[in-house]
Image (cartoon, rainbow, N blue to C red):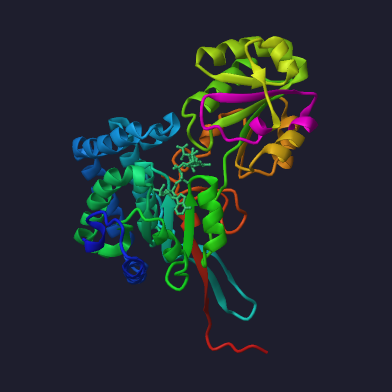
Amino acid sequence: MSQLASAPLESLPAESLVGLCDTLASQARIAATELASVRSDAKNRWLIAAADALVAATESLLAANAVDVASATANGLSAASIDRLTFTPGRIQKAAEGLRQIASLPDPVGRIRDGQVRPNGLQVQKIGVPLGVILFIYESRPNVTLDAAGLCVKSGNAVILRGGSEAFHSNTALHRLLAGLLPQFGLPEHAVQLVPTQDRAAVGHLLRMGDRIDLAIPRGGESLIRRVAAEATMPVLKHYDGICHVYVDAAADLEMAERIIINAKCQRPGVCNAAETVLIHRDIAATFLPRLGTALTGQGVEIRGCEKTRQFIPNATIVTEKDFSTEHLALILSMSVVSDLTEAIRHIRRFGSKHTDAIITRDLPTAQRFVQEVDSAAVVVNASTRFNDGFELGLGAEIGISTDKFHARGPCGLEELTSYKYVITGMGQIRE
Ligand SMILES: NC(=O)C1=CN([C@@H]2O[C@H](COP(=O)(O)OP(=O)(O)OC[C@H]3O[C@@H](n4cnc5c(N)ncnc54)[C@H](OP(=O)(O)O)[C@@H]3O)[C@@H](O)[C@H]2O)C=CC1
Ligand SMILES: N[C@@H](CCC(=O)OP(=O)(O)O)C(=O)O
């Protein structure tokens, strides 16, 4: 296992920090070259062994996590952040299931994506290849360490993990488990590395290493992402925030709408695909808002609504434009009554973040227009926004959810962590 990853290194002199980053990047580059030609079978066996080891190590992982949670709690971290940070046996099981699902998925490396034979007899194939080295800077959320490592290795990429400092003990334990198993399956030991310092200057150094790092993925608050987008010398895959909407149309099944809104807002309010705003068609406001208000209040949700909303939900406070533009990541919900679909779409275009937006309707043309006109990474019809997730969409996991249009959009799984090359095979053809 890499010596670099074994212990936290604080307050390194600037020169040593550059040297450390340099070593991480060079080791990753070599590992990526080796990993690109590793057989699927070896990668899959490593994934399954990692899933088994994870479950077997539940107790010690929970102990390492408890250290992080205790100090985060003492430091007054928000409820949403503590929720992201916390490991439970259930979450460990789910992460292990994700690794097994990744193992069961087709290997994108070497997959023929497209092919044709040209009139001159040339055989042209488009073949999946790894991106190379991925620098992943992410929030204090240990399950993300597992998702990222599993996806990167299966897609033939070496990854440099820079998790949040609050999760340092959890990530160190997870990294030790994952990286420790790599050589047993003939995989390069530096395929999965953890930046062993919490010094943010390391991020700046790594972002300058575009000669060895092929992609940077920042996953966290807006200031992190803006920094990475500004400083990176390699392409960046990202989303800024998740201001997700649920629009309840006049033709909605109201029982369904209530169920979906409660799930979209309350199931895990601290994640990016949780709903932040509900828009209600005015024709159903009088019948739907009182019951929705009662249901949301019963779940502990603070409702901030427009004047019309407040006519039917008296405990709602007045919503502001700032609320509509804020990803609360908490049990706070903005609500507005709209006159029609056009106004709902206009609202989403103005305040949304092109992440995930849902419509509840029984009217097919209305649903089709919503899908056509809402330009978000995921547009959902009659289901919860919470489904914009790699595991739920059958990708095994995701390394992040992109709202970019280049190179990938939505949950980024194995396919999105690869590129392709053209392989052109002839029989001596020359160009006329
Ligand atoms: N929109 C979204 O999807 C998300 C929003 N958030 C929100 O962002 C806020 C902060 O949450 P948190 O999870 O701590 O995310 P942060 O963005 O603060 O941190 C995420 C990771 O980036 C690092 N980081 C942050 N800023 C910089 C920087 N300027 N230079 C280098 N590295 C940096 C952190 O390191 P360090 O260990 O030093 O903190 C951590 O590893 C919260 O309000 C949270 O709810 C968080 C995650 C996702
Ligand atoms: N995969 C997640 C959603 C993604 C998410 O929360 O992203 P982020 O807020 O960037 O960490 C889930 O629904 O579990």
Q: Quadrant of the C terminus?
A: bottom right
Q: Quadrant of the N terminus?
A: bottom left
Magenta extent: 322-344
Residue at the location (79% across, 26% down)? Answer: 340
Q: Quadrant of residue 317?
A: top right
Residue at the location (39% across, 32% down)? Answer: 76
Residue 93 seen in render: no
Q: Quadrant of residue 140?
A: top left
Check if residue 333 falls in the magenta segment: yes
Residue 289's x, y, as percent? 67, 13
Q: Taking 49 as reference, is 77 left or right? A: right
Check if residue 350 falls in the magenta segment: no
Q: Taking 20 as reference, is 270 left or right? A: right
Residue 258 seen in render: yes
325 w.r.t. 292: above or below: below
Residue 414's x, y, as percent? 44, 54
Residue at the location (54% across, 27% down)? Answer: 264
The residue nearer to you, when weighing 367 against 61, is: 61
Residue 112's x, y, as percent? 49, 64
379 w.r.t. 12: above or below: above
48 w.r.t. 179: above or below: above
Q: Quadrant of residue 3?
A: bottom left
